[in-house]
């Protein structure tokens, strides 16, 4: 599906102006089923019909509010002219398509080459809810920074790790190629492992449910669960979570995330990397974050609040966001990254 925007031309990109009103509903302990549905919007049949989508009034209103990053590309790069761009990317649904089986969320070779090219020229990080080693195994690029478990486990390229190390750092290597540089919740590892085992046992009777150990969090996937059984998934998770007051529930796209109760998320990971790389609070830096999930909203909000960067939501379904712009799917993400690198190379040669 192509992008569409019938709004008047944007005169300038103003990062210091007020943002759009945001109406993200809070997660409520007693409204699990409601929150599961809110966090997992189903693509409308209109998305299979380009003309139907373009003339759907709800979609038209939404795309005016969150214009396609491809349609306003010139405005975005104008804002980045002469600046260092830092690139932050979600994985599932952003660099790879959403699939029924999480283990099959494989990145295409073409996308991998595009991301590699970006990482050669720009500070680039992938920030995912998955365990950092799993993301590394999918991406297989040593030029990147990786933040797994929603930013609680960060590793960077060998030779660059010293620039982002601090008192919380680790020095153990990953496959001789990457170095752990930050782990926010090491003390929770035993309890996360324990909860993982309990959830596997608790949900084994629910057809389609899958529990994934992402090291610093546990993901309970219900993508393949019949919607009438979503309440069973919620109840099983809630029953176990009640026994662990130091753990909390967060919602993603058809996944329940059990995480430590600490002040850390994808937004904090972005702040940590920007600060550690000496790129925070600088008028000469433009961070760009691209993601598709509710968990990416923390990062979008950080960039909006600091008035320093740009958030781009990947979605074919109208939904509220702290992002400024939108892209439909991973294919449009790849097009955007290609155009960004072509522009960056042209800017470098023109100096």
Image (spheres, helix red, strand yellow):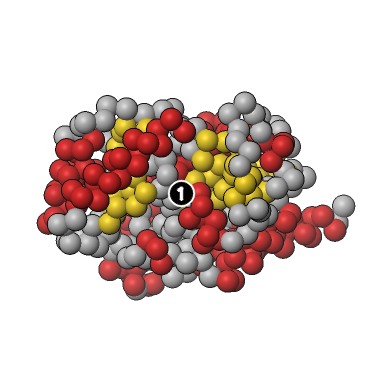
Q: Residue at x 42, y 40 (%)?
A: 216
Q: Quadrant of the N terminus?
A: bottom left
Foreground pick, 206 / 57: 206
Residue 119: quarter of image: bottom right
- SS category of the residue bearing label 1: loop
Residue lying farthest to the right in this orientation: 351
Please state the total of marks drawn on the protein image. Answer: 1
Q: Position of residue 67 (x, y in %)?
A: 49, 53
Q: Is residue 226 left or right of residue 23?
A: left
Mark 1, other Cα within 10 Å: few <14 / some 14–19 / many ≥20:
many
Q: Position of residue 331 (x, y in %)?
A: 51, 67
Compared with 76, 278 (above or below) is: above
Q: Position of residue 326 (x, y in %)?
A: 48, 54
Can the viewer see residue 90?
yes
Q: Is residue 19 left or right of residue 51?
A: right
Foreground pick, 66 / 249: 249
Q: Position of residue 88 (x, y in %)?
A: 58, 48
Q: What residue does disc 1 label? A: 131
């Amino acid at each position: 599906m192509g992008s569409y925007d019938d709004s008047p031309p944007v005169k300038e990109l103003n990062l210091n102006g007020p943002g759009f009103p945001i109406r993200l509903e809070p997660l409520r302990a007693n409204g699990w089923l409601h929150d599961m549905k809110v966090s997992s919007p189903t693509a409308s049949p209109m998305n299979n019909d380009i003309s139907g989508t373009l003339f759907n009034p709800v979609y038209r209103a939404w795309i005016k509010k969150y214009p396609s990053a491809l349609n306003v590309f010139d405005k975005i790069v104008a804002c980045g002219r002469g600046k260092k761009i830092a690139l932050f990317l979600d994985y599932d649904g952003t660099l790879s398509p959403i699939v029924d089986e999480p283990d099959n969320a494989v990145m295409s070779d073409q996308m991998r080459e595009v991301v590699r090219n970006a990482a050669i020229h720009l500070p680039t990080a992938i920030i995912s809810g998955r365990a950092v080693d799993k993301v590394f195994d999918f991406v297989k690029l040593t030029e990147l920074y990786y933040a797994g478990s929603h930013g609680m486990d960060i590793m960077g390229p060998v030779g660059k790790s010293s620039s982002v190390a601090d008192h919380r750092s680790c020095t153990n290597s990953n496959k001789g190629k990457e170095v752990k540089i930050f782990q926010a919740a090491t003390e929770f590892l035993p309890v996360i492992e324990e909860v993982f085992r309990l959830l596997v046992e608790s949900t084994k009777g629910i057809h389609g449910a899958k529990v994934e150990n992402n090291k610093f969090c546990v993901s309970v996937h219900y993508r393949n669960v019949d919607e009438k059984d979503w309440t069973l998934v919620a109840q099983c998770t809630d029953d176990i979570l009640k026994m662990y007051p130091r753990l909390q529930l967060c919602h993603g796209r058809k996944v329940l995330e059990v995480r430590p109760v600490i002040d850390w998320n994808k937004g904090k990971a972005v702040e940590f990397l920007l600060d550690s790389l000496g790129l925070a609070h600088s008028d000469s830096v433009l961070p760009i974050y691209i993601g598709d999930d509710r968990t990416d909203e923390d990062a979008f909000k950080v960039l909006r609040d600091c008035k320093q960067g740009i958030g781009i939501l990947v979605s074919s379904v109208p939904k509220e966001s702290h992002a400024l712009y939108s892209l439909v799917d991973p294919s449009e993400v790849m097009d955007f990254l290609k155009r960004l690198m072509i522009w960056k190379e042209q800017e470098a040669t023109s100096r």
